[in-house]
Amino acid sequence: MHFDFFAKSGFYDYVGEWNEPPFFREEPVTPKDLALYIADAALDKHALALEIINVEGKVSYADFIVICSGRSARQVDAIIEGVESALKQKKIHPLGIEGRQAGQWVLLDCGDVIFHAFEDKKRGFYDLDGLWMDAERLPLPPSTTARRS
């Protein structure tokens, strides 16, 4: 199998499917739009206590952090699968995924946006919300707010 990672028209991923690289997308996605899109996808899978935290200028590794909870490891996995599927539809490929096997805390690195999905008990233990207490929170878009009520 030939892997053509450098062609501007696309590349083969590790299973041989043809994909366009994320850096050649026709429509650029701003970090804020990506964070809102990830939040919307997580809420589609009934994510709890979702927060979008603006860390732009505070850290060098991301502009936004999206944090949510699930009631169980199974729900956390469903949230991650839902977000991955939504990103794939937009031809956005995460740079990395950590913690998937345990399912208690899964991190999805999307470049300028870091997504954390916690099992309820683990979220309180690590308290990332408290770490970024002073950072600005983005309001959820009206479509997601209406769906949550």
Image (cartoon, rainbow, N blue to C red):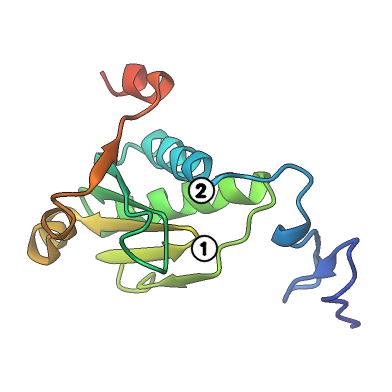
- The residue at the point 49 percent across, 58 percent down is 112
Q: Which residue is mark 2?
A: 31
Please identify the quarter of the rendering in which residue 61 is found. Answer: bottom left
Q: Identify the residue at horizontal 83%, vertical 69% (top origin).
A: 11
Asked if the residues shown at circle 1 and circle 2 are in contact, with their CB atoms under 8 angstroms apart, the answer is: yes
The residue tagged 1 is 111
Question: Which label was assigned to residue 76?
Answer: none
* Mark 1 neighbour class, 10 Å CA radius: few under 14, some 14 to 19, many 20 or more: some
Q: Nearer the viewer, residue 144 or 61?
A: 61
Return the x and y of residue 100 as percentages of the image width and height.
39, 69
Answer with the quarter of the image where residue 144 lies.
top left
Left/right of residue 26 with respect to residue 51 in the rendered view = right
At x 32%, y 54%, the residue is 55
Q: Residue flagged by tag 1: what amino acid is it?
A: Gly
Position of the N terminus, as image quadrant, is bottom right
Quadrant for the C terminus, please: top left
Amino acid type, callout 2: Pro
Give the SS element for disc 2.
helix
Depth order, front residue of 111/68: 111
Q: In the rendered view, does 16 fall on the left or right side of 146?
A: right
Q: At which x and y percent is residue 20?
A: 80, 59
Give the residue furthest to the front: 57
Which residue is depicted at the point 25% across and 42% down? Answer: 136
Dot 1 lies on which element? loop
Percent position (x, y) of residue 113?
A: 45, 56
Q: Position of residue 68 (x, y in %)?
A: 27, 48
Q: What is the CA distance from the residue labelled 1 to the residue labelled 2?
A: 9 Å
In the shown orientation, is residue 20 left or right of residue 55?
right
- Nearer to us in this view, 2 or 127: 127
Q: Considering only vertical position in the picture, is 131 above or below 34?
A: below
Mark toward the start of the polypeptide (1 vs 2): 2
